[in-house]
Amino acid sequence: METYDSKTASRIVGVSLRQLQYWDEQDFIRPSVKLADGRGSKRLYSFNDLICLKVVRHLARHGFNLQKIRRCVAPLKQKAARTEHPAKSLRYLTDGEELFVITDDRQTILEAMEREFVLCLSIGNLVRELDDQTRRATAHRKSKKTGRRLADTRAGAA
């Protein structure tokens, strides 16, 4: 399983390191691979953690308060805890007042369809976007390590 430190997660998701730290301290979105263990220790995030962070960022950008966002992200976090595969089929809908998490529950879908929606967020799109971003970050990290090894080899030869 690929893991992402705070710096990489921050860059991929588009939030500050301080924001990640705050969300962890407030037990809002915590890294599932490794929690911080004192000053200077690393937080390690999974791909599913990045999905949750991206959803939070997206909803916050659209003006949702943290209470609504917390309620919205709960099903995503629960599903992530049970599986390694991201919840590509989840979809969030809102009419500006209420937030609906659409899954395969027919009753929820029917209730949601009675509303007029102003925002729809498809998790599948976020998963594809994050997949591309994490691949680039991983490739960048590997190329930096290879470059350092090559520089060390050249310095030793001199």
Image: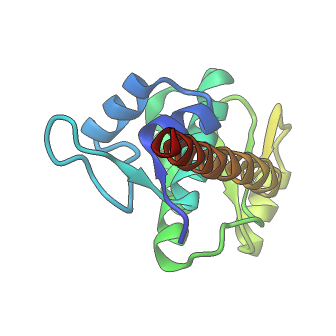
Residue 97 vs residue 74, the one in the foreground:
74
Evaluate whether residue 72 shows in this view.
no
Task: Look at 56% across and 60% down and name the residue there.
Answer: 48
Task: Look at 16% across and 35% down and name the residue there.
Answer: 39
Measured as percent of width and height from the top left, residue 102 is found at 72, 60
Task: Look at 61% across and 29% down and name the residue there.
Answer: 14
Q: Quadrant of residue 140?
A: top right
- Residue 94's place in the image compared with 138, above or below, is above
Q: How is the image coloured?
A: rainbow
Task: Look at 66% across and 67% down and name the residue there.
Answer: 86
| Residue 50 left/right relative to 156 | right
- The residue at the far left in this view is 38
Measured as percent of width and height from the top left, residue 126 is found at 75, 49
| Residue 140 left/right relative to 70 | right
- Residue 18's place in the image compared with 141, above or below, is above
Residue 39 vs residue 56, the one in the foreground:
39
Residue 71 vs residue 7, the one in the foreground:
7
| Residue 45 left/right relative to 53 | left
- Residue 144's place in the image compared with 35, above or below, is above
Measured as percent of width and height from the top left, residue 38 is found at 13, 41
- The residue at the far front in this view is 158
Measured as percent of width and height from the top left, residue 31 is found at 38, 52
Evaluate whether residue 115 shows in this view.
yes
Count the marks: 0
